[in-house]
Image (cartoon, rainbow, N blue to C red):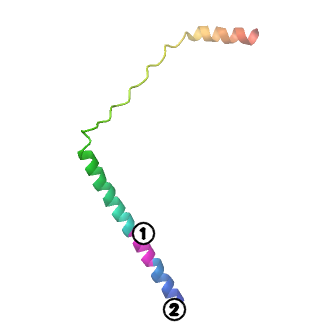
Amino acid sequence: MQLLGQGLVLMFSGMGIVYLFLVVLIFTAKFASAFVSRFDHILPQEAPKKAAKPAAANDDANVALAIAVALG
């Protein structure tokens, strides 16, 4: 019975340490986010430019070409 009690104490203390670590991690991440956002104006990130789509060729010409290749 004593071994079971030690196991439970070890389990709850381990779970408590993990829970405490996760709480500290959350607060650290929030603090770091607020700290970095304060200095974001120094090096702003530019929005990525969208690449222009190439002009699509006539679909009828592509179909005719595919038929010619298949028959040829």
- Residue at the spot 67% in from the left edge and 12% down from the top edge: 66
Based on the displayed image, in which of its 4 quarters is residue 52 positioned? top left
Q: What residue type is labelled 2?
A: Gln
- Residue at the spot 52% in from the left edge and 86% down from the top edge: 4
Residue 51 drawn above or below residue 29:
above
**Residue 54 location (% of width, % of height):** 49, 16
- Residue at the spot 66% in from the left edge and 9% down from the top edge: 65
Q: Of label 1 and label 2, which has the lower sequence position?
A: 2
Image check: 23 left or right of 15? left
Q: Foreground: 46 or 11?
A: 46
Q: Which mark is residue 2?
A: 2
What range of the chain is rendered magenta?
12-19
- Name the residue furthest front: 42
Tag 1 residue: 18
Q: What residue type is labelled 1?
A: Val
Q: Residue 41 carries which label?
A: none
Considering the whole magenta stretch, tell me its main secondary structure: helix
**Residue 2 location (% of width, % of height):** 51, 91
Q: Foreground: 35 or 23?
A: 35
- Residue at the spot 52% in from the left edge and 14% down from the top edge: 56
Q: Foreground: 70 or 32?
A: 32
Residue 46 drawn above or below residue 58:
below
Residue 15 drawn above or below residue 3:
above
Q: Is mark 2 on a helix, strand or loop?
A: helix
Residue 35 drawn above or below residue 45:
below
